[in-house]
Amino acid sequence: MSKREAAGRIGKEHYDSSEYFVGEGAGHLTDMESSFQRYRVAKVTELAWPRSGDRVVDLGCGWGTFCFAFADRVASIVGVDFSDLPIGLCRQRLTATPKANVSFVCADAGATGLEADGFDLVIAADLFEHLYPDDSARVAREAFRLLVPGGRFATWTPHRGHILEILKNHDILLKRDVTHVDYKSMGDMKRLLSEAGFTIERAYYAESHVPGLSVVERALSPLVSLLKRRIAVLGRKPDVRE
């Protein structure tokens, strides 16, 4: 158990009662047109490439960003989050902006209760940094269970070795996000998916959304680990029929 876990494991109660989803600092997250959210949607789309016939699950859906962004691109999408607060916010938005193929479920991402072998694409964007190691393994296995043979699992998470994450984790210039309980490395993510049964199809680092810094990251990150910003890994469930 890490020192942070010993100090008190962050769980559902924290997200339900804190200002994580509705606080002053969440403005760039609740605004679907913010540069950060547009960047997230573009990068995860590039990784997962949702198709018109896809049945999709978004694990750790938060504000429903990908559910609404992908609604017009896919057959259906289910947003899953274990906190009642974001699910309530997503359902309010769905009432205001109806999408017949979008739904939300309040459930553990590691035990969703959704149909096995029933989906073509599972997304976990900015989720794994919020998960303790045992939960990360459960979520990867659940994604495998949910997918049809040949289905894809798209994961997107901050790289723990990036300079900004190092500064934040030491409360230097930037404030640490206490909900980021276990940053993963590229090796961690590839191992998680492989051990769950996935074949790794793509694994790469992506630059940040910050103007200027993103240019430096694209140019130098192959040589400088401190500039590797986001980890993108796409796994595929083997199709035994092939």
Image (cartoon, rainbow, N blue to C red):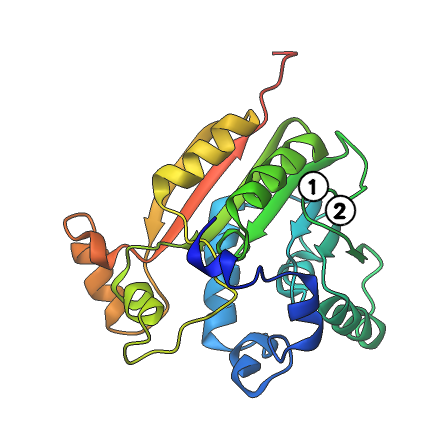
Looking at the image, the residue that sits furthest to the bottom is 24
**Residue 122 percent location from the top left of the image:** 63, 43
Q: Amino acid at mark 2?
A: Ala
| Residue in front for this viewpoint, 175 or 186 | 175
Looking at the image, the residue that sits furthest to the front is 6
Q: Earlier in the sequence, mark 2 or mark 1?
A: 1
Residue at point 67% right, 52% down?
73
**Residue 51 percent location from the top left of the image:** 63, 43
Against 214, is 29 above or below?
A: below
Residue identifier under label 2 = 75
Residue at point 81% right, 63% down?
99
C-alpha distance separating marks 2 and 1? 5 Å
Residue at point 56% right, 63% down?
8
Residue identifier under label 1 = 54
**Residue 58 percent location from the top left of the image:** 66, 51
Quick one: SS at disc 1? loop
